[in-house]
Amino acid sequence: MNEVILKEAADIIMNSEYFIALTGAGVSKESNIPTFRGEDGLWRNYDAMELATPSAFARNPSLVWEWYAWRQGLIGNCEPNPAHKTLSSWENRGILKTLITQNVDGLHIRAGSVNVLEVHGDLWALKCTSCDYRERLSSPVSGIPTCPKCNSHLRPDVVWFGESLNPQIMRKVYSELELADVCIVIGTSALVQPAASFPLIVRQHGGRIIEINIEKTIISSVVDVHISGKAGEILPALNELLQ
Ligand code: NAD
Ligand code: ZN
């Protein structure tokens, strides 16, 4: 771990006025939740990009539900890791104002974070494909769940590739991005829009960006500090410098 780079990041955070975080699948990797693009990102030879789409659900709802039930089972057995816990402790201490996540695993909330904006939804939430019925589960689904109001198929209440994001959540996200003077970006490949552009919005009005990732991403060349390493190791080390 490069101490000089860590110290530089810690100084930026200590001097911030409105510090926010953006997380992606990499923050949950050490909780054993596979990322979409990593080498363990395949399920029965399916690429997630083929399954997390409205057309995949229209074509084969039982296959898509089987995949979601598998993911629910996986996540139900996983625990928040030191990265989730550090972020929640920063919110508790008043250092971190808001956490924007692309993850649907709910681990930030389970780690105790409260001010969380889940831009891609929540894996335990369901909505009807025909009416306004919604519900939230606590155990994995079996088969294709149906709506108690109109008998249509229920679908996961998550944002699929090609769908638009919830406008109410997005309004809050953009107002946080405008307020932020420092944003830490953790474990995202910065390939999925519009989340990929969030750090650039902070940068456009003079804010600073810290990136934590095990590899370089397309935003690495424009961030102020890139820290190379695992989120579950880097965040606690950074925390040591924030005392
Ligand atoms: P991604 O899979 O595209 O990228 C993951 C990134 O994390 C990569 O850049 C990788 O280098 C990095 N990474 C892997 N392990 C890491 C670690 N231990 N520490 C730090 N970085 C690490 O993920 P994305 O950018 O979030 O985009 C994928 C989309 O898929 C998102 O919309 C997300 O909602 C969804 N997704 C969510 C989950 C989840 O909820 N846990 C899991 C998979 C995918
Ligand atoms: Zn219905």
Image (tube, rainbow, N blue to C red):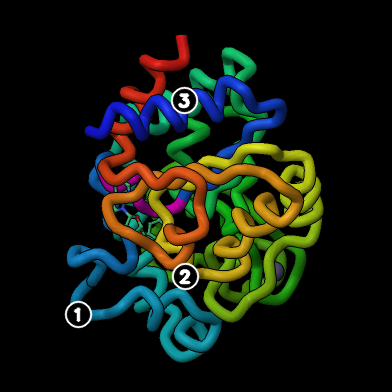
Q: Where ligand 1 lies, by quadrant? A: bottom left
Residue, x 68% and y 72% (percent of image)? 164
Q: Nearer the viewer, mark 3 or mark 2?
A: 3
**Label of residue 12 in the image:** none
Residue under label 3: 10
**Relative image position of residue 25 (x, y in whole percent):** 39, 53
The residue that label 1 is drawn on is 45
Q: CA distance from mark 3 to mark 2?
A: 26 Å
- Quarter the N terminus occupies: top left
Q: Which residue is mark 2?
A: 191
Q: Is residue 25 magenta?
A: yes
Q: Is residue 43 left or right of residue 204?
A: left
Q: Is residue 34 left or right of residue 17?
A: left
Camera-side residue of 88 and 220: 220
Mark 2 neighbour class, 10 Å CA radius: few under 14, some 14 to 19, many 20 or more? few
Residue 127 seen in the current view: yes
